[in-house]
Image: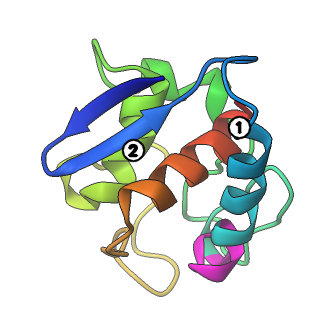
Amino acid sequence: MAAVMLGVVTVATWSRGESEAAPQQRASGAELFSAKGCATCHTGPDTQALFEAFPQLDDASSWAGDRKPAMSATDYLAESMAAPAAFTSPAFAGGMGPTSGMPQLRLTSEEIAALVAYLLGT
């Protein structure tokens, strides 16, 4: 297991086959994606968003690693959840939907790790 430091948040990440907890973490992430309201604004691997102005996250593994120079997909997604104002996605259309940007959800490091695992399919 590797740990990634993001300010005050530590996100645990697992490689395929490295931990039997990974499938449970992905399942937890899927539940959190709906429970925390992510699915309202973002299309996810198993959900359809209510709004079109917000970045689609259903195929995050194909683009998240390229969004910010020298930042992995895991780190980018974790930062986006832990500190939403740190970077505005170029996929954000703005001005549409209920907010002008992503809200601060005050997620725990375990919740962030589960959501990242869910979005990346790891």
At 52% from the left edge and 81% from the top edge, which residue is drawn? 97
Q: Secondary structure at mark 1?
A: helix
The reply to whether the magenta stretch includes residue 35 is yes
Q: Against 93, is 121 above or below?
A: above
Residue type beneath disc 2: Ala
Residue that extends furthest to the left in the rendered view of this protein: 7
Residue that extends furthest to the bottom in the rendered view of this protein: 98
Query: Is 31 left or right of 37, judged from the image as shown?
Result: right
Residue that extends furthest to the top in the rendered view of this protein: 70
Q: Position of residue 108 (x, y in %)?
A: 37, 65
At 51% from the left edge and 29% from the top edge, which residue is drawn? 64
Res. 43 in view: no
Residue to which mark 2 is pinned: 78
Q: Position of residue 33 (x, y in %)?
A: 65, 67
Query: Is 103 left or right of 37, judged from the image as shown?
Result: left
For the residue pair 102 and 27, the one nearer the viewer reads as 27
Residue type beneath disc 1: Ala
What separation in Å lies between label 2 and label 1 (alpha carbons)?
16 Å
For the residue pair 112 and 17, the one nearer the viewer reads as 17
Q: Against 64, is 18 above or below?
A: above
Query: Is 39 left or right of 47, judged from the image as shown?
Result: left
Disc 1 crowd, CA 10 A, few/some/many (<14, 14-19, 20+) = many
At 72% from the left edge and 18% from the top edge, which residue is drawn? 16
The reply to whether the magenta stretch includes residue 58 is no
Q: Position of residue 95 (x, y in %)?
A: 40, 74
Q: Which residues are magenta?
A: 33-40
Residue to which mark 1 is pinned: 22
At 49% from the left edge and 76% from the top edge, which residue is drawn? 96
Marked residue nearer the N-terminal end (2 or 1): 1
For the residue pair 119 and 13, the one nearer the viewer reads as 13
